[in-house]
Amino acid sequence: MTGDQGGTTPAPYVLKPEKDYRGVRGWLLLLCFLMLLVAPGQRGYVVYNDLNVLFALYGETTLDSALVANLRIAVSIETFLIFCSGLLSLAGGLALLTEKHYAPKLAKLFWASGPVLNALLLLSAWLYFPAGEMFDDTAKLIGRDFVSSLLGGALWISYLIRSKRVKATYETVPAS
């Protein structure tokens, strides 16, 4: 008795040749989908809501005028940063999909920018909102987004660094 079932020995594990890893498929395709559709869509929704808040603030007469001015500045800063993040996501996703050699760097920049963006939003809220309930509620929301962007960024940056498919698709070998 040899210990194997059915009398056949399993074939040894064979690695795929590097050329088989090349191309935008699998997890890399999911990353492109996230960067081309999901992230810009989410950021577009935030920008849309921010613009509605800005337009509502221009007609506001019941709040303190200094608070309204600070809210306008804070929401304007947030809108600008979120819009830039959406553009970076689109650029990175398109570069990944079209297999540009610089695409992984651009994608890593996008995923690393999430926690930085949230830190800037928190700083903006701290500078322009008075201490109290409004700042506390805003800080909780931004803190939650900071943690999720940190985890998502760590996951996707790790994938971009370690993936054989990413290496095979985007790394260029100098001609000898």
Image (cartoon, helix red, strand yellow):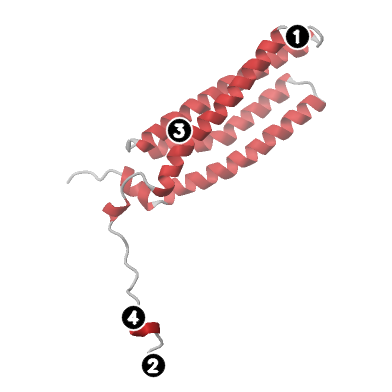
Residue that badge 1 annotates: 60
Question: At 58% from the left edge and 30% from the top edge, which residue is drawn?
Answer: 117
Name which of mark 3 and mark 2 comes first in the sequence.
2
**Label 1 neighbour load within 10 Å: few <14, some 14-19, many 20+:** few
Q: Which mark is residue 9?
A: 4
Under circle 4, the secondary element is loop
Question: In the image, what residue type sits under mark 2?
Answer: Met
Marked residue nearer the N-terminal end (4 or 2): 2
Identify the residue shown where x is 35% and y is 69%. 13
Front one among 98 and 88: 98
Distance from the alpha carbon under mark 4 to that under mark 3? 46 Å
**Mark closer to the chain start, 3 or 1:** 3
Q: Which quarter of the figure has residue 69?
A: top right
Q: Is residue 61 above or below residue 161?
A: above
- Measured as percent of width and height from the top left, residue 145 is found at 64, 36
Q: For the residue labelled by badge 3, is the local secondary structure a helix, a strand or a loop? A: helix
Where is 168 relative to 82, above or below?
Answer: below
| Residue beneath disc 2 | 1
